[in-house]
Image (tube, rainbow, N blue to C red):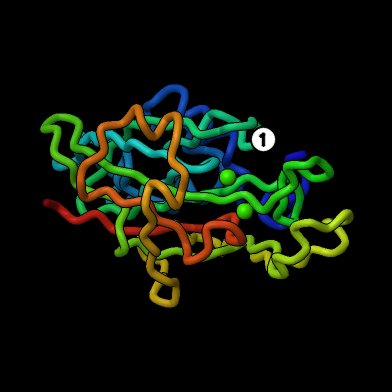
Amino acid sequence: MDDHRPVTRPATATAGAALFLALTLTGTACSSDDDTSTAGGSSTSSSSDTASDTSETAAGDATTFTAEIWVDNWFALSIDGEPVGEDPVPITTERSFNAETITFTASYPFTVGLVAKDYKETDSGLEYIGTDRQQMGDGGLIAQITDTATGEVVATTDDGWRGLVIHRAPTNPECETSADPDTECESEILDEAAGWADPDFDDSAWTTASIFTTHEVGTKDGYDTIDWDPAAQLIWSSDLQTDNTILWRTVVEAP
Ligand SMILES: [Ca+2]
Ligand SMILES: [Ca+2]
């Protein structure tokens, strides 16, 4: 049931690589998959001075960070345009409410790019289609990034994050109870813009995040396993239900 995303699939072609990185928790390997990894950046080996950079120490100020992320239902994380990890639990897993920890290296300032997906069975936007649980389903995201050495929280999800909805469905929510949602539900689907997670991408036209309560999101499972900083807030677009895939960006400045 995960094959109904012909629009978004090409842009997530690095998913396999990202999964590898998540499992190895390095964020340093796998730089040969596509042009995004070489164009991206400084998360592990600075691209600004290829002649001398043989490791993160060459940059002089690279720091190791720990990202803790909980998304209803799935995410992929990039730093300066380079994939560093993704939720290893497939979005198709029922009750995919796990939290994940990803370690990466970067130098300030660095750009966080995060794809967040609420589960949908098809492009109708619905889940549990054909059962008595057929519904739109809702999303939600919270994340915090910590300097691994000092323990200082240097970034949290808040209303400063900018997002772009690239899968919205159904745009006619009354189809939620349709016996044929794949025909009757309407959607708005965009491609991921090339380089959207790169530091120099212009996100000024994207909208800032909306803040939600734990009750509104219905946090559960992995959410409760993380000691969230008080500044970390649950975010999404303005619509938890119909906005299913969102690209998120924020820039982390030196504290
Ligand atoms: Ca969901
Ligand atoms: Ca939804």
Q: Secondary structure at mark 1?
A: loop
> From this viewpoint, which residue is outermost toward the top?
24
**In the displayed structure, would residue 87 be above or below residue 240?**
above
Do we see residue 53 in this rendering?
no
Residue 4: x percent and y percent?
77, 48
**In the displayed structure, would residue 74 be above or below residue 30?**
below
Determine which residue is flagged by label 1.
92
Residue 44: x percent and y percent?
32, 38
Closer to us: 34 or 63: 63
**In the displayed structure, would residue 62 be above or below residue 211?**
above
Relative to 123, is 234 on the left or the right?
left
Do we see residue 31 in this rendering?
yes
Write down the quadrant of residue 236 in the picture: bottom left
Closer to us: 214 or 93: 214
Closer to us: 154 or 21: 154
Q: Which residue is depicted at the point 28% across and 37% down?
A: 105
Whether the residue under disc 1 has CB within 8 Å of ligand 1? no
Residue 3: x percent and y percent?
77, 43
Q: Which residue is depicted at the point 34% across and 44% down?
A: 143
Residue 203: x percent and y percent?
41, 70
Q: Which residue is depicted at the point 60% across and 55% down?
A: 244
Image quarter where the N terminus lies is top right
